[in-house]
Image (tube, rainbow, N blue to C red):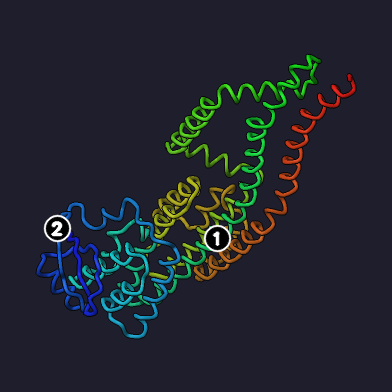
Amino acid sequence: MPLYEYTARTQNGQPQDGHLEISSEKALGEYLTSRGLILTSVKAVQSKRGGIASLFRLSPKVNVVQKIFFSQNLQVMIRTGFSLSNALHTLAMQTESKKFKEIILAMQNDVENGKSFSEALKKFPTVFPELFVNMVAAGEVSGKLDEVLHQLSLQLKKDHTLISKVKSALTYPAIVVSAMLGLIVAMMLFVIPNLLSVFEEAGAQLPLPTRVLIFLTKFISANGVWILLGGIAFCFLVYRIIKTRKGKYYFHLFLLQSPVMGKIIKKINLARFTRSLSSLLKTDIPIVQTLQIISRTLGNVHYRNAMMKASEEVKKGVSIVKTLEMYPKLFPPIVTQMVSVGEQSGTLDTIVEEIANFYEEDVDTTMANLSTIIEPALMLLLGAGVAGLAVSIILPIYNLSQAI
């Protein structure tokens, strides 16, 4: 179907514009009329090959909070008797994001044209990930779409909370380090050069810290542009290497083995793994497909590889706990033992949900204490930098005053 760019107005004369994939201009006019809008202009901008999905695939920019409210409200509306089409239309009219509104309207149009809700969601993979789509598909088949949407809203909330806490915990040290580096560079560019002429005119033997500082200052002043370009090129090169398969493998391995961040990354991946497993086990999705979906939701490549290997082993009849025990450095004994209990008792979904709650609380506590752990090291680093600058500047001034 072609994609149309349209302008319409409400009964009160207020203009509205947007995009919609629909069979014809006539169908677009009828569609807008049924929603109390009067079509004023229309232009075909794209064919089905691109589709509205490709329009948003480049940069969908749909806030996680918006998706949480979308899932929650859609669940409530379906549970209270709204048809899926009417619920989607109501949510589209309520959302403040223009792009998300167009996405919801496009999904409503697909549903009205006979497509399932999960098929409509598949057109926007960067907005609704595979986990979301597959759980919705399972809810449609089982007739429990409202329950699945409730699970999805909980999943989105937990993920959003986890990521927000990690970001907020890392913000403080990033600001302190950036401020310290900015201060040192500013001193070298604007303060120290004014003192160099005084030291050079004195002709006295300068202390080693001062000579080192003078050398660094002159070097940065003379080659500042090249240093900046070199730094950018180095960062770009490292970024490109990390994006390769082998580079990502070793970089993620380095992160897992790092002293402080390694434990945090393991806890985050374990929390996401168990939370996703709990949500998917409450649907009718086969366990092999469940593990494959989870492998594509985890951030660390080693956990993703472990999940893909686990799905292959489970397909052969191996239990989940046996596959997890193959990776003792990724899945600690507390996880494998509780998964074993869950498999034997038939309550694996409940057990892994408890594990998810445990690791999410553990990450929360770790993030809350991270600034307390890092703050002394940052203060020592900042103090050492300031002290080094002070000694390099004050020591020759003191020597000169003594000579006079």
Q: Which image quarter is the N terminus in?
A: bottom left
For mark 2, does the 10 Å Cα neighbourhood hold few (<14), some (14 to 19), or many (20 or more) residues? some
Question: Is 359 above or below relative to 213?
Answer: below
Classify residue 84 by image quadrant. bottom left
* Residue bearing mark 1: 162
Q: Is mark 1 on a helix, strand or loop?
A: helix
From the viewer's perspective, is the residue at label 1 or at label 2 nearer? 2
Q: Where is residue 138 in the image (x, y as percent from the top left)?
A: 34, 69
Q: Residue furthest bottom?
A: 80
Q: Quick check: 356 left or right of 141?
A: right
Q: Where is residue 16 in the image (x, y as percent from the top left)?
A: 25, 69
Q: Quick check: 27 left or right of 338?
A: left
Q: Which of marks 1 and 2 is nearer the N terminus?
A: 2
Please give the label number shown on residue 350. Answer: none
Q: Which of 199 and 268 is in front in this view?
A: 199
Question: Is 259 above or below relative to 401?
Answer: below
Residue at 72% x, 54% y is 372
Residue at 89% x, 19% y is 403
Residue at 84% x, 22% y is 400
Amino acid at pointer 1: Leu
Q: Quick check: 141 left or right of 49?
A: right
Q: Position of residue 28 (x, y in %)?
A: 15, 69
Q: Is mark 2 on a helix, strand or loop?
A: strand
Q: Which of 134 and 111 is in front in this view?
A: 111
Task: Work out how far the residue at label 1 is from the one at label 2, CA to CA, in angstroms.
Answer: 42 Å
Classify residue 128 by image quadrant. bottom left
* Residue bearing mark 2: 44
Classify residue 127 by image quadrant. bottom left
